[in-house]
Amino acid sequence: MILAVIPARGGSTIRRQDMKEIYWVNGAVYVNCVADLTKDTSFNDNPVGYVMPVERSIDIDEESDFLLAEHFMPIPTMFEL
């Protein structure tokens, strides 16, 4: 599928390397107390971010994502077993 390119403000595109860093919730780590978990919300009032390296943050939504994660998963040697 080919999609149209949406130009950035000013009418030109911006290289990814020149863009500001952005962060989003990846769902890898949640730490919460029991009292907050019994409320009708998933998060407490004081969320704290953790910047996770991209190579350690693979979202598994489809089988192809799982295969990619499996490919990068370290294989233990016989001495580590």
Image (cartoon, rainbow, N blue to C red):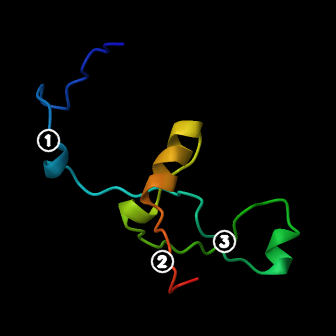
Mark 1 is on which residue type?
A: Arg
Mark 2 is on which residue type?
A: Thr
Report the residue that reaches farthest toward the right: 38
The circle on residue 77 is: 2
Which of pointers 3 and 1 indicates the residue nearer the eye? Answer: 1
Label 3, secondary structure: give it: loop
* 36 lies left or right of 5: right
How far apart in space, not on screen, are marks 3 and 1 (Cα)?
Answer: 36 Å
Task: List x then y, in percent, for residue 39.
Answer: 86, 66
Which label's residue is closer to the chain start, 3 or 1? 1
How far apart in space, not on screen, are marks 2 and 1 (Cα)?
Answer: 41 Å
**Residue 61 location, quadrant:** top right
Report the residue that reaches farthest toward the bottom: 79
Which label's residue is closer to the chain start, 3 or 2? 3
- Please identify the quadrant where the N terminus is shown: top left
The circle on residue 15 is: 1
Measuring 58% from the left and 82% from the top, which residue is drawn there? 81
Measuring 88% from the left and 69% from the top, which residue is drawn there? 38
Measuring 25% from the left and 22% from the top, which residue is drawn there? 6
- Mark 3 touching mark 2, by CB under 8 A? no
Mark 3 is on which residue type?
A: Asp
